[in-house]
Structure formats: C-alpha cells, structure tokens
Image (tube, rainbow, N blue to C red):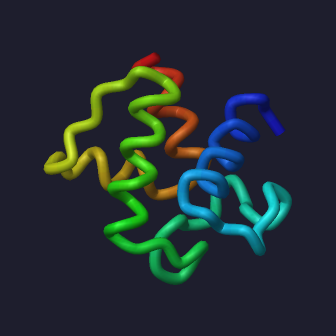
Amino acid sequence: MSDLKIRIKKLIIESLDLEDITIDDIEDSEPLFIDGLGLDSIDALELGLAIKKEFDIKIDANSEETKQHFASVDALAAFIEQNA
C-alpha cells in the first residue's frame, strides 16, 4: 500500500471521526459512498475540505469529475497525484 493511500485512509478516518474503522478496513478500490464505506454527501463535503487543507488542492464541488475522483481511495490517490 502506498504512503499516499495510507495518508488518505487516515484522513478519511480522522476527518469523519470513524472511530470503529481502521486503515485495513478500507479497501483501495472499494466505493466510499453508498454500498461501500457508506459515506454520504455531508461526509463528502467534510472529506473534500480535509483533502483541500492537507494537500492544498482546489476542488470544484459542482464538477461531475469531482464525484468520480471521490469514488474510492484509488481514485482519490490518482486525483491528488495529478493535482498536488
């Protein structure tokens, strides 16, 4: 597992106060929303703010591409690598 993916998983857990979840519980390709980790739109906003702060990346909340970038840890890692 890459250092970036570990950082993303820790950020998800810490920024969303997911106390009962560990980094090993989050699969890299697992969907973060609905059927996967079960995050919702409020979680997406909080996670987006945490990613913006942690990686100094501008995120367009209304972009359809942004939804794709937040689909999984793999997708987030690719987005951060392209924009950091």
Q: Total label count? A: 0
Quadrant of the image occupied by residue 5: top right
Residue 74 located left or right of residue 20: left
Q: Residue at x 69, y 30 (%)?
A: 4
Quadrant of the image occupied by residue 45: bottom left
User: From the viewer's perspective, is residue 13 above or below residue 57?
Assistant: below
- The spot of residue 19 in percent (x, y) is 73, 68
- The spot of residue 47 in percent (x, y) is 45, 51
- The spot of residue 33 in percent (x, y) is 47, 71
Residue 51 located left or right of residue 65: right
Asked whether 55 or 78 is in front, the reply is 55
Asked whether 75 or 49 is in front, the reply is 49
User: From the viewer's perspective, is residue 3 above or below residue 65?
Assistant: above
Q: Residue at x 62, y 45 (%)?
A: 11
Asked whether 41 or 78 is in front, the reply is 41
**Quadrant housing the N terminus:** top right
Residue lying farthest to the left in this orientation = 62
Q: Residue at x 46, y 17 (%)?
A: 84
Q: Residue at x 51, y 42 (%)?
A: 76
